[in-house]
Image (spheres, grey):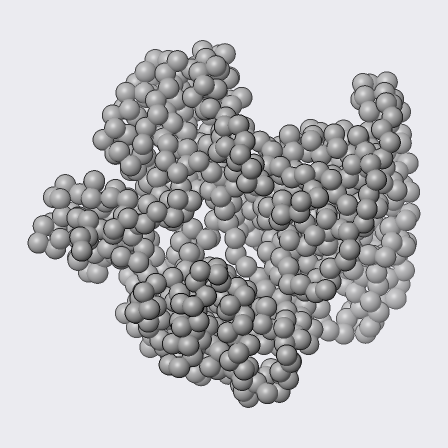
C-alpha cells in the first residue's frame, strides 16, 4: 500500500516496520512529528522525555537490554544529549539504537544552523541521510540492521525539507523482533578508563570496517549519465540537483559518514569535472579535497542557509537566471497569538523597564518590537543561569533590574539545575516561569507537569510549586497573567526582593483551550488615538490611518487590550 | 479513478509537472488545503511532493506550502518563476510570493487584508495598490472574497475550502473526486459545511 507521508511520519513508520520497542524524544522543530506519530502505534512504547539527554539514555537502556530503540531530537537537542552520545559509541549496543537528528538549514525555527554530520565524525558514529520520505522509512530499517551488524549506534540525519515534506511511501509489514539476550559485560558496558581504552580500539576497528563496507553499501550509489559533469551529493541537495541537472552523473551518498573513499575515486575517474553539492559546511567537500581530488565547486556555495535548484544551476553554469525580483513590501514576522497569556507579562516587563534573560519557546517572540521584553536567548534553560551570572557580575542592585523568563516545558527540560545554582550559590534572582501548560512552539506536546503522557494517558502531575519549594526557593507566587494589575504588582515586588524568588504565570495556551470569547470592539467615540493598545502587539488590533479597530475574526476575547486602554474605549461585543 | 494529465486545461500542462504554491498567514489553514490537493493528486496516480512550514512561522508569520505533482517529482520545493498556480489566503502574501509565479501562471487571491505587525505599529504602510500590482504581475488573476463567503456560511474557518473550490474550477478534475478528498481530510463534524464552502468557491 502507498501513502503520502511527511518525512517525519515515514521515520515513524520505519521504526514500526523495524520492530522498535522503545521510542523517546523531547519535542523540537523540525523533529517533533516523528515521536508524535510513533505514539500512534500500540506496539511501541513512546515517551516525551524531560530532555534529549534523558531521551537518549532511556533509548540506550532499551538497546543494551535487548530491544530496538529510537530517539529523536532537533539538532540543538543533540548538544544536550552529547554526553551519552560520545560514550555509547564506545559501549556499542546490543539491540539496534538509532538516533534521529533533524537539522534546520536556513533556521526556519532554530537558534543556530549546526551541522550534525560533524557529530558523527567527532563521536565515531555512522550517519545516514535520506532525501525523501521513502528513503526516510527505508533508511531507518537499514540503520537498525547496521546498528546490530556493527554493534554501533547510528545517526539518521534529517533536514527541515526532508522532515516537513510529504512524498509517497510504499508501506511494508513490520518485522518481528525478539528481545535479544542481555548478558552482563563490564568490559563493554562500564566505561571506566581501563575498559574504555580497550573499547576505543574496538571503535576504531568498527569505523575502519564501516568505511570499507561503505564502498559497497546499497545506499551509496553512482548514477552514470553524461560524464561531462559529475556531482557528489546527499540528502535534500540530491533532489535539487536532479531538478536542474537531469543528465549529470551523480554519486549519491546515503551514508555520509564514514566516507566511501574507493567509490569516490571510482566516480571521480569516470567524470570530467567533479562537483560536491551539499548544504551548510563543506563536510564531504573537505574530505574529497583531502583525498587529493580536484573539485570545481570549491567555495562555490555559501555555508549559510539552504540551497535551491536555481542556486545550484546558476552557480554551476555561471548564468544569471534573470529571476523576477521580490516585491518590496512590509515583512510579516511571527507574533504571539491573539489571547496569548505571555503578552500581558511582556507588556508589564516593558512598562517596568526590566531586562530579561530569555529562553527557547513561543515566548522568545516577546523579544520583537514593540514588546521587546527579553534581552537574550541562547539555548534551552539558559535564562536561569544567565540571570544569576548577571547578578554575580554586576551586583545586587543591578540584579533588581533583571529577571529570567522561561516556559514550563523548558524549565523542566533544563531550568531546574540553574535554579538550584541560584539557591546553592546564594543568588537573589527572580525567575518568571511562563506556564502555559504545554510545549507551545512545537505544536502542543505534553510534559511532566501536564498530567498526560504522549499517548494521552493520565500521568502523575509534576507540581512545580512543590518542586521549586524543595529546591529552596521560599518566595513563590502564582499569578494569572490575564490579571495585569496583579502581574505588575508581583513583578515589582519580587525583583526588589533581596532573596531568590519565582513567579509562575499560569494560564493555558490560547490555542490549547481553543476558547474564543466574545470579541472586543473599539468605541470610536471614546478612542483618543493614544495608541497604547498597539503596544501589546496583538495581531487582531488594526490601524487604518488613525482609526483603531479590532479584527473580529482574529480576536479571541482575552481583554488585555481593554485592560491597557486608559479611556475605556475598548469594550466587549454584546449581541 | 484516474484522470489523464492531458485532460487538464491547457495552461496547467507544463513539462509534466504541476506546481501549486499556497501562501498565507500562519493559522489560516493553508496546510489542510495542501494536504487535500496532495491526497487527490496521489489518487489520480501522480507522483506527489508537498513541502510545509511547521514551528515558529506558524505563529502569525508569512507561511508557504509547496505542492507538486506529475510523472516524477524530485525537489519538494517550487523554484522562483515556476509556480503554475498560486493560491493566496491574504493579498499582501500574494504579492510577497508573486515572483514565484510563472509567466503563464494563475494567481487566486482571497481579498482579505491582515495587517502585519510593522503595519500595526505604524513602522510600515500596507500598500494601497496590492491588487493592482498582482494583476500587473500575472497573466491571470482571480480575486475572491472568500472570508465573506465563509462567514455567510456561518464559520469563518472554512475560507480555505472556499478557495479550494475556486482552484477546483480551474482544473478538469471531476467534482466528485474533489468532494471525496474534502470529506476525507476535514474533521467529520465539519464535512457538510466544508462541502458547502467548496461548492460556493467552485460556483464563483
| Residue plotted at (57% across, 85% down) | B8
Q: Residue at x 34, y 13 (%)?
A: A498
Q: Is residue A410 left or right of residue A550?
A: right
Question: Vertical placement of B34 versus A527: above or below?
Answer: below
Figure quadrant of the N terminus of chain A: bottom right
Q: Residue at x 48, y 14 (%)?
A: A470
The x, y position of residue A88, in whole percent, is 77, 31
* Quadrant in which residue A236 is drawn: bottom right
| Above or below for B45 versus A38 | below
- Frontmost residue, A22 versus B74: A22
Relative height, residue A34 to residue A61 (above, below): below
Q: Residue at x 28, y 20 (%)?
A: A493
Residue B92 appears in which quarter of the rendering? bottom left
Q: Is residue A462 left or right of residue B111?
A: right
Q: Nearer the viewer, residue B117 or A298?
A: B117
Residue B13: horizontal and vertical position, in percent? Answer: 59, 84
Apparent side of residue B75 relative to residue A528 in the rendered image (left or right): right
Residue at the far left: name it. Answer: A525
Residue B168 visible here? yes
Q: Is residue A325 visible?
A: no
Q: Nearer the viewer, residue A532 or B37?
A: B37
- Residue B54 location in percent, x, y? 52, 53
Q: Position of residue B94 (x, y in %)?
A: 41, 69
Depth check, front residue: B149 or B22: B149
- Quarter of the image where the C terminus of chain A is located: bottom left
Q: Tally the numbered discs.
A: 0
A81 displayed left or right of B156: right
A372 w.r.t. A516: above or below:
above
Amino acid at each position: 500500500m502507498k501513502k503520502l507521508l511527511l518525512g517525519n511520519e515515514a521515520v515513524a513508520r520505519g521504526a514500526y516496520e523495524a520492530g522498535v520497542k522503545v521510542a523517546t524524544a523531547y519535542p523540537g522543530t523540525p523533529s517533533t512529528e516523528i515521536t508524535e506519530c510513533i505514539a500512534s502505534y500500540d506496539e511501541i512504547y513512546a515517551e516525551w522525555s524531560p530532555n534529549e539527554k534523558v531521551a537518549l539514555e532511556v533509548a540506550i537502556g532499551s538497546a543494551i537490554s535487548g530491544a530496538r530503540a529510537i530517539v529523536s531530537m532537533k539538532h540543538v537537542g543533540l548538544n544536550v544529549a552529547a554526553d551519552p552520545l560520545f560514550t555509547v559509541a564506545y559501549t556499542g549496543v546490543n539491540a539496534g539504537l538509532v538516533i534521529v537528528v533533524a537539522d534546520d538549514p536556513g533556521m526556519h525555527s532554530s537558534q543556530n544552523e549546526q551541522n550534525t554530520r560533524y557529530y558523527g565524525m567527532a563521536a565515531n558514529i555512522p550517519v545516514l541521510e535520506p532525501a525523501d520520505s521513502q528513503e526516510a522509512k527505508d533508511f531507518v530499517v537499514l540503520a537498525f540492521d547496521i546498528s546490530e551488524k556493527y554493534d554501533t549506534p547510528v545517526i539518521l540525519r534529517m533536514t527541515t525539507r526532508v522532515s516537513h515534506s510529504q512524498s509517497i511511501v510504499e508501506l511494508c509489514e513490520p518485522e518481528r523482533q525478539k528481545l535479544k539476550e542481555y548478558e552482563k559485560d563490564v568490559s563493554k558496558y562500564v566505561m571506566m578508563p581501563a575498559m574504555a581504552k580497550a573499547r576505543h580500539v574496538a571503535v576504531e576497528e568498527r569505523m575502519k570496517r564501516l568505511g570499507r563496507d561503505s564502498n559497497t553499501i546499497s545506499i551509496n550509489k553512482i548514477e552514470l549519465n553524461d560524464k561531462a559533469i559529475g556531482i557528489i551529493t546527499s540528502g535534500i541537495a540530491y533532489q535539487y540537483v536532479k531538478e536542474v541537472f537531469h543528465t549529470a552523473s551523480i554519486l549519491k551518498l546515503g551514508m555520509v559518514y564514514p566516507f566511501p573513499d574507493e567509490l569516490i575515486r571510482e566516480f571521480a575517474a569516470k567524470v570530467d569535472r567533479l562537483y560536491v553539492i551539499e548544504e551548510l559546511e563543506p563536510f564531504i567537500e573537505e574530505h574529497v579535497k583531502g583525498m587529493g581530488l580536484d573539485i570545481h565547486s570549491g567555495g562555490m556555495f555559501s555555508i549559510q542557509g539552504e540551497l535551491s535548484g536555481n542556486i545550484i544551476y546558476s552557480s554551476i553554469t555561471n548564468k544569471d537566471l534573470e529571476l523576477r525580483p521580490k516585491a518590496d513590501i512590509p515583512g510579516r514576522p511571527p507574533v504571539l497569538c491573539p489571547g496569548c497569556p505571555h503578552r500581558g507579562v511582556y507588556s508589564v516587563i516593558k512598562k517596568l523597564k526590566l531586562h530579561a534573560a530569555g529562553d527557547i519557546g513561543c515566548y522568545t517572540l516577546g523579544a520583537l518590537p514593540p514588546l521587546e521584553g527579553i534581552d537574550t536567548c541562547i539555548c534551552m534553560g539558559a535564562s536561569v543561569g544567565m540571570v544569576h551570572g548577571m547578578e554575580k557580575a554586576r551586583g545586587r542592585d543591578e540584579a533588581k533590574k533583571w529577571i529570567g523568563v522561561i516556559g514550563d516545558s523548558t524549565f523542566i527540560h533544563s531550568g531546574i539545575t540553574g535554579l538550584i545554582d541560584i539557591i546553592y550559590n546564594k543568588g537573589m534572582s527572580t525567575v518568571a516561569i511562563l506556564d502555559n501548560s504545554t510545549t507551545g512552539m512545537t505544536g502542543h506536546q505534553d510534559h511532566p507537569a501536564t498530567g498526560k503522557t504522549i499517548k494521552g494517558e493520565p500521568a502523575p502531575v509534576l507540581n512545580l510549586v512543590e518542586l521549586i519549594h524543595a529546591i529552596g526557593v521560599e518566595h513563590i507566587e502564582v499569578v494569572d497573567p490575564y490579571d495585569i494589575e496583579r502581574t505588575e504588582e508581583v513583578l515589582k515586588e519580587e525583583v526588589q526582593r533581596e532573596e531568590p524568588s519565582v513567579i509562575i504565570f499560569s494560564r493555558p495556551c490560547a490555542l490549547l483551550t481553543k476558547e474564543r470569547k466574545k470579541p472586543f470592539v473599539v468605541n470610536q467615540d471614546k478612542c483618543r488615538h493614544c495608541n497604547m493598545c498597539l503596544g501589546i502587539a496583538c495581531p487582531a488590533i488594526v490601524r487604518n490611518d488613525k482609526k483603531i479597530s479590532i479584527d473580529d475574526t482574529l480576536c479571541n476575547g482575552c481583554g488585555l487590550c481593554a485592560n491597557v486602554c486608559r479611556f475605556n474605549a475598548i469594550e466587549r461585543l454584546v449581541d | 479513478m484516474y484522470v489523464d494529465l492531458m485532460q487538464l486545461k491547457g495552461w496547467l500542462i507544463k513539462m509534466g509537472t504541476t506546481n501549486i504554491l499556497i501562501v498565507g498567514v500562519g493559522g489560516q489553514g493553508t496546510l489542510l488545503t495542501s494536504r487535500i490537493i496532495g491526497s487527490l493528486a496521489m489518487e489520480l496516480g501522480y507522483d506527489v511532493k508537498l513541502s510545509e512550514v511547521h514551528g515558529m512561522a506558524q505563529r502569525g508569520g508569512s507561511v508557504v506550502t509547496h505542492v507538486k505533482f506529475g510523472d516524477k517529482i524530485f525537489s519538494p520545493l517550487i523554484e522562483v518563476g515556476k509556480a503554475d498556480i498560486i493560491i493566496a489566503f491574504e493579498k499582501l502574501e500574494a504579492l510577497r510570493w508573486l515572483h514565484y509565479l510563472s509567466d503563464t501562471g494563475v494567481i487566486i487571491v482571497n481579498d482579505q487584508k491582515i495587517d502585519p505587525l510593522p503595519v500595526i505599529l505604524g513602522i510600515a504602510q500596507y500598500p494601497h495598490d496590492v491588487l493592482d500590482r498582482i494583476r500587473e504581475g500575472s497573466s491571470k488573476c482571480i480575486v475572491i472574497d472568500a472570508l465573506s463567503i465563509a462567514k455567510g456560511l456561518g464559520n469563518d474557518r472554512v475560507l480555505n475550502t472556499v478557495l479550494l473550490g475556486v482552484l477546483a474550477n480551474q482544473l478538469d478534475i471531476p467534482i466528485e473526486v474533489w468532494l471525496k478528498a474534502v470529506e476525507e481530510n476535514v474533521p467529520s463534524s465539519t464535512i457538510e459545511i466544508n462541502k458547502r464552502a467548496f461548492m460556493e468557491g467552485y460556483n464563483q
